[in-house]
Image: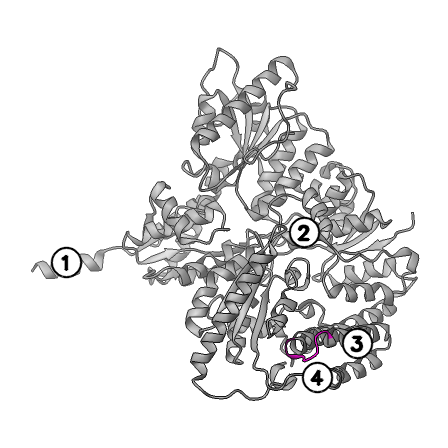
Amino acid sequence: MESIVTYPHFGPITLLLKAIFLELEVPEERIVNPSTPNKRTLEIGSEHSPEWMCTPFKLSLGSQIESIERGANHVFQMGGIGTCRASCYGPLQRLITEDLGYEVKYTNIDYHLPFEMVRDLKSVSNNFNTWQTLKALRKIWVKNYSLDLIEHLITFYRGVEIEKGQTDRVAKEIYDKLFSTHKVKEVKKYHKQIPEIFKEEVQIDEEADPLKIGIVGEIYVVHEPLLHLDLYRRLNNLGVICRNTVSLKKFTDLPAKLNPFVKEHYKIYREKARPYIQQYCGGDGTETIGVTILLREFGWDGMVHIWPFSCMPELTAQTIIPSVTDDYGMPVLPLIVDEQTGEAGFQTRLEAFIDMLKIKRENERNGKTQEKISWETFNYD
Amino acid sequence: MSEKNSTKQHKKRKKRVGFPRALLYYYFKAMWESFFEALGAEVILSSPTNKVTKDRGVLETLDDECYSTKLFHGHVLDLLDKEIDYIFVPRFASRKKREVACPKFVALADILKYTKDNLPPIIGPHYSTSREKHGFWRLVKIIFEIGFKFTKNPLRIIYAALKARKDHKTAMKNVSIDEEALKKWENSEILLNDAPAIVDGEKPLKVALIGHTYVLNDSFASLDVRQRLQKLGVDIITSEQMPRKLLERQILRLSMVNYGLEFSEPEKLPKKQLEKHLFGRNDYFYFEFEHEIVGTAMHFLENKSIDGILMLVNFICGPVSVSMEYAKLFAKKIKSETPIIILSLDAHTGEAGFQTRLEAFSDILRMKKSTGTIPKSVKMVSGSIFESWS
């Protein structure tokens, strides 16, 4: 039986996962790209998942089942020996889909086992050897830098743009250009141009005085628009610029991992969190605390902490965060999402939070004027 | 004169170490107690769980914490009233290479530090074999770091550590039985727990009580489930009593199921083949304390040696949500006829409802025993607290 590959939907990162198989030259008829998930996807997923499982599991299961119904029979999913439940996804979903009567092969990708990972990817590629596979994977982590950059640029420019919708249009063009470029050199060259393109094409309101809000939380929820209910757009529409601080870079940034002189971003976050929690507590829990402190030092106004119901590491972080707020004066809005989160309550809470942040900023500023905003002052990388 | 006496007494007074009677304490109580006592410390336990503990714990924690964590906070508050010098809350992550505990355990000490006022110094050694690759030397470091807080004599510390190790081993041996004893229990030759009451002159039912050690051994948290079952004429075996080797074997089988090797017995496979399939494979069920839950359920679902399985779990417990699903899927896959009921507990579980469910379950088991089938009027899946029947 010929394997028809699929993978779960993962917010904007889906583009990256799609690119992996594109670079491995998997023929088009042997790959099923997941469709954009909707409420139905989530319903299918929750119906067949354990009741207390975290929402990302349910959505990714629903997304897989939809792909399987469209003909896929080989799923790539997370696996391994983890600290939280995320690494159980693959093995458990395999049993569930088998119970539903599908004949599906699962390959569990574990970044702790790089050799197995390369071997598994090689096996689905277009008769690639190991060197070719590695070269294909290299393009992925190079593109991941650009993906992060574009995401940050979008959430910045959309908050202060004059003509609504301009940023999205520019972003779409850039995404198309980026994922149709295949040579690493060209991608790197294009990467440097991306901020310039945004600067030229999007007119921003220079008089604007937006709040700056960071977003932390569980990686899947932070990226998946269906689960975070389009949080970034909501914040941008309220005249706020925001920034996602959770990145897949943690797993894919191999050059930084191999280079002893570069400190990876998540290690910086963990160091910041050290006074509060010394050891790794699973998922992105430790980083959540570190980012909260770091962004306060950069002069940001607030944080939104978003995580799926029953997520264990983020719950730990949430228990400690009130004392971080006390010590540093960084307001944090906790938002718990699951498959039944309502939009109205969500919006109300965001609006109330932003109003309170504005009052706080007025008091702190004490009549001083704000310097003009630009991407350079916003970006802290 | 009296002042001098009091200072003398103060000098002689042993240092008091407090243990919250919750979570990991139930797994390691023999080890911890004998270690600290041999070091010359006085071990202070929080009082057994009661309504006050529960109410204080529930007020203290976030809503989505599991019931046992809520009780843990209640126990800590209880300890704070008892004038302790240290509180012992280890940052325990894992003790085997490929296994981890619940991710909440590793951060308990830090959570306490930032949620409780006037907390005494925490003794919270961090130990993680799977992620930080801690091993023997880390253990030595921990032992001496703790030891020098209580005594200056290194020999005494070594003695305490060895004694703790020995006591832990004997305690584990006393709790869990070997496979011969399990066979004997299955054939009703021996009793493992209190003798069940005899109801209507019938033979006692045989039920496996599955759950975390910290739920089953806490009579308040588990709503006295052992006594209730005993009165209903049920002979029980708990998941912590199961032979360890058998459980590990079941877990190995589970990861083989994931690889399409149809439930073949691991010991029947040649060792090389087994290693080839399992080494480097990344679908091992890595939650350590779930092994006894899934393993016991798998064993009894397959062997028709008992009448039913009762699973007692905390509401919204993360690892259990996975192991419950494993048990259910396994039961479906092998078309098991052993009835399994999953009851979830939280701070609001009422006694009356709990008792009704236990009675209904035991009645159905008796009916099945006498007639051979479950009556058709019984719904197989229902309501909130009945997680499922199968």
Disc 4 element: loop
Name the kind of residue labelled 4 in the image. Answer: Gln
Assess disc 3: are there few (<14), some (14-19) or many (≥20) residues with their C-alpha within 10 Å of its C-alpha: many
Q: Position of residue B285 (x, y in %)?
A: 65, 47
Q: What residue would you read off at disc 2?
A: A57
Q: What residue would you read off at disc 4?
A: A203
Of all chains, the one bearing label 1 is: B
How far is mark 2 from mark 1, CA to CA?
Answer: 62 Å
Residue drawn where x is 46% and y is 75% of the image: A359
Of all chains, the one bearing label 2 is: A
Depth check, mark 2 against mark 1: the one in front is: 2
Depth check, mark 4 against mark 1: the one in front is: 4
Residue A195 in view of the camera: yes
Name the kind of residue labelled 3 in the image. Answer: Ile
Disc 2 element: helix
How far is mark 3 from mark 4, CA to CA?
Answer: 17 Å
How far is mark 2 from mark 4, CA to CA?
Answer: 40 Å
Q: What residue would you read off at disc 3?
A: A174
Question: Seen in the image, is A10 located left or right of residue A228?
Answer: right
How far is mark 1 from mark 3, CA to CA?
Answer: 79 Å
Question: Seen in the image, is B323 located left or right of residue B192?
Answer: right
Magenta region: which residues? A159-165
Name the kind of residue labelled 1 in the image. Answer: Ser
Label disc, if present, on residue B6 of the rendered structure: 1
Assess disc 4: are there few (<14), some (14-19) or many (≥20) residues with their C-alpha within 10 Å of its C-alpha: some
Of all chains, the one bearing label 3 is: A
Q: Are marks 2 and 4 in contact (CB under 8 Å)?
A: no
